[in-house]
Image (spheres, helix red, strand yellow):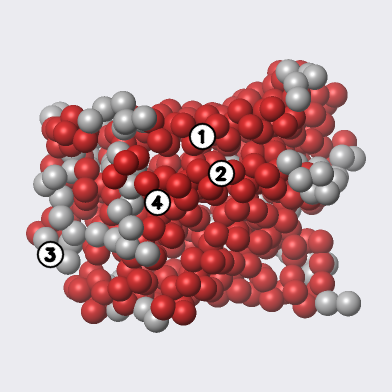
Amino acid sequence: MSRIVSSFAVQSSVQDDDPEETSPVVGPSKPRLLQVLGPGLITGASDDDPSGIATYAQAGAAFGYRLGWTLLYTYPLMAAVQMVSARIGRTTGHGIAGVLQRHAPNGLLQVTVVLLLVANTANLGADLGAMADATTLLLPGSPRWLLVLLFAGICVLMQMLLAYTRYVAVLKWLTLALFAYFAALATTQVDWAAFAHGVLMPRIGLGQEELTTVVAVFGTTISPYLFFWQSSEEAEDLRVHPRRRDLVHAPEQSAVALHRIEVDTLTGMAVSNLVALAILGTGAAALHAHGATDIRTSAEAAAALRPVAGRFAEAVFALGVVGVGLLAVPVLAGSSAYAVGEARRWPVGYSRRVQEAKAFYSVVGLATLVGMLISLTPSLDPVRALFWSAVLNGVVAVPVMAVMMRIAARPDVMGSFAIRGWLKALGWIATAVMALAVIGMAVTSWP
């Protein structure tokens, strides 16, 4: 079935509203903030996927407010890494996999893509299962398998049938689902002094469970699929906005483009981490304080809220899981399709019709199908799938980040826009922090 809006109409509408045509500052005759926000906002919102919700809820339930600092101090690191990702796409006109395909050994490219696919598929399956479990709380008696199939179908059809601009608009509107967690937090009795202390004062024990939880928090906050998605979306926007060119060949566009990326990314990551703090705070106040310390899925967290904070808190928490899942599952499948397609030099992107990029859309469908089958596997323990998919993301992120940072610093790839200074330093600090957390988890887990 063809896209709802033709490519010509897509390009015409976007050309008239390109936020890079003027400085990305809200004001008279200048684009509104919502126009400026795009890949960064969607990336940040999709970071709080059902896997992330389960991880943050478990962190709060198990350790109270004491791990709140992880979400404050990862903010600059997360923002820096995503800014590097966005710059790669906007500067070169290719996503990360596309750049690796052109400038790195083939073995490195293949290993990076395989690691991404493994992490994405596990995460996708866990997210679909969590969406189904959350819906059964809202609609008791609903067949779980049917809900998984329904959500998988909605996500695939949304990607295949909506025109690019309409699709991006839908993803932006789905970010509103995140506000459910501020509502959930507002219905609980929060010890604000303890919450503030946990956020501002870093404390970490050396126990295996706590270190594993830290890796899970880091992994769901700084996830590989986010790097690939944001870089590829920046490259995609070059095809959709006719006046934009990659910065290597159009350096005169750099001032406005890099400013937009900065505003977009800082805003998107701030939204992501504030929502994560709300989820962690809800888990600490409503669950940990009442002895419920072993919550490892978003659906369990929602159900556990009912006797403490009431039916309303349970409902908004569950609705948030479904809404954010509808945002995150397409991003997971899309980042896989971008990576595979760019690595093989296929035509890629949601701005292309299905018949123009059959292989790209086939990967989208196949990734979602495999994730769906994983979520329906009888032997899979849904209680642990979400949490451990976050841990897997944390482990996989380390080599992917190292590769990305090396590529982004190469003048032969990025020209005069090779990263340097504070951005390069923060990116490598983020990589080192992730590596240390993974090493600490491995050491404490050794029998």
Asked where in the image residue 351 lies, by quadrant, the reply is top left
Q: Kindly indicate whether the residue at mark 2 contacts the one at mark 1 (C-beta within 8 angstroms).
A: yes
Q: Label 1: few (<14), some or many (≥20) within 10 Å?
A: many
For the residue labelled by badge 1, is the local secondary structure a helix, a strand or a loop?
helix
Which amino acid does the dot numbered 3 rest on? His
Whether 389 is drawn above or below 42: the answer is below
Marker disc for residue 155? 1
Question: Spatial distance from mark 4 to mark 2, Cα to Cα?
Answer: 14 Å
* Eye-nearest disc, 3 or 1: 1
Residue annotated with mark 4: 359
**Which circle's residue, 4 or 2, is located before the other in the chain?**
4
Q: Earlier in the sequence, mark 4 or mark 1?
A: 1
Q: Secondary structure at mark 3?
A: loop
Q: Between 170 and 198, which is closer to the camera in this rendering?
A: 170
Closest to the camera, between mark 2 and mark 3, is: 2
Q: Does 292 sit left or right of 165 as displayed? A: right
249 versus 293 height, above or below: below
Residue 350 seen: yes
Residue at disc 2, secondary structure:
helix
Residue bearing the label numbered 2: 368
**Residue topped by disc 3:** 249
